[in-house]
Image (tube, rainbow, N blue to C red):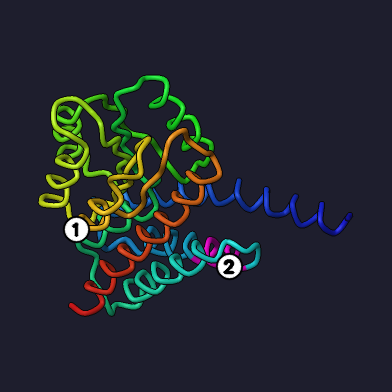
Amino acid sequence: LKLRLMIDKFRGKFVEESLDNIRDLEESLFLLEGDTKNREIIERIFRAMHSLKGGGAMFGFNDLSEFTHHLETVFDWVRTGKLEVSKDLITLTFESVDEIKIIIVEDEVVSNDELKYIISKDKKFKVIGQVYDGINALQLIKDEEPDVVFIDINIPGISGVELAEEIKSILPDTTLIFLTAYDSYAIKAFELKIYDYILKPYDEKRIVESLNCALSTVISRSENNFSEIFAS
C-alpha cells in the first residue's frame, strides 16, 4: 500500500512538471519563430521533449511517451543540422503540445453544459466553443478548425447529419462524434465514417472512453504529419 501511494505521489509530481514543461515549450516555440537558428532555444525544446518522453514511459503515460519520442527525434535532427526549422515544423509542434480542441454542438443548454463539464475534467481537452444550431456551428468550426466535434443530430438550422457532411468536405481529418437519443442513425454514422456514436442520456464513463480513443486518433494524425516532414 505504501509503495502504491508513493507511486501515485510521483505520478502527480510528474503531471505538474509536465505542465511546466509544456508551458516552457510553448514559450520556446514563440521565441524560435523569431530566431530559427538559436541553438539555446532549440536545446530547451529538445530537453523538454526528452523529459516528457522519459517520465511518460516511467509512469505509464504511453501515448505521451511515444508521441514525444517523435518530437524529440525531430528536434534532435534540428540541433544536429539534419533538418532546418520551418514554419510548418513550428506550426505542427505548436498543435502537438496544445490541448485537444473540442467544439460541442448541442441545442439543449443543460446537455451542452453537462458535456462541457465532463470533458473539462481532463486537462488534455479544451472546449473552445459551445454552439446550439448548425449554421453558427459550421462557421465556428471553419474559423477554429477543432480536433474533435461533438454533434447532436437533432439541431436547428441544418441537421447534425448535414453538418457532419459539410465538415467532412472542408476538414476531413476532424474527429466527429454523434450525440443522439435514438439509435436509428447508426447506419448513417457508419456511412459518414463518424468516429463514435453516443446515446443519451450521457454516461460519463462512455464519454471519457470516447475521448481517450479520439486522443489516440489525433496523436496518430500528428505523427503522420511529422512523417511528411521526415520524408521531405
* In the image, farthest residue toward the right: 2
Q: Which mark is residue 229?
A: none
- Left or right: residue 19 compared with residue 194: right
The tag earlier along the polypeptide, 1 or 2, is 2
* In the image, farthest residue toward the front: 184
State the SS at label 1: helix
Q: Main secondary structure of the magenta part?
A: helix
- Quarter of image, res 71: bottom left
Q: What residue span does the magenta drawing correspond to?
A: 50-57
Residue closest to the eye, 144 or 180: 180
Residue closest to the eye, 23 or 179: 179
Quadrant in which the N terminus appears? bottom right
Q: Of tags 1 and 2, which is closer to the observer? A: 2
In the rendered image, residue 220, in percent from the top left (x then y), is placed at 35, 66
- Left or right: residue 2 compared with residue 101: right
In the rendered image, residue 33, in percent from the top left (x then y), is placed at 25, 52
The CA span between labels 1 and 2 is 27 Å
Disc 1 target residue? 87
> Crowding at label 2, few (<14), some or many (≥20) Cα neighbours within 10 Å?
some
| Residue located at (26% from left, 54% from top) | 187
Residue 56 magenta: yes
Residue 167 magenta: no
Residue type at the position of mark 2: Gly
- Left or right: residue 9 compared with residue 165: right
Disc 2 target residue? 54
| Residue located at (27% from left, 63% from top) | 37
Residue type at the position of mark 1: Lys
| Residue located at (52% from left, 39% from top) | 203
Residue closest to the eye, 195 or 46: 195
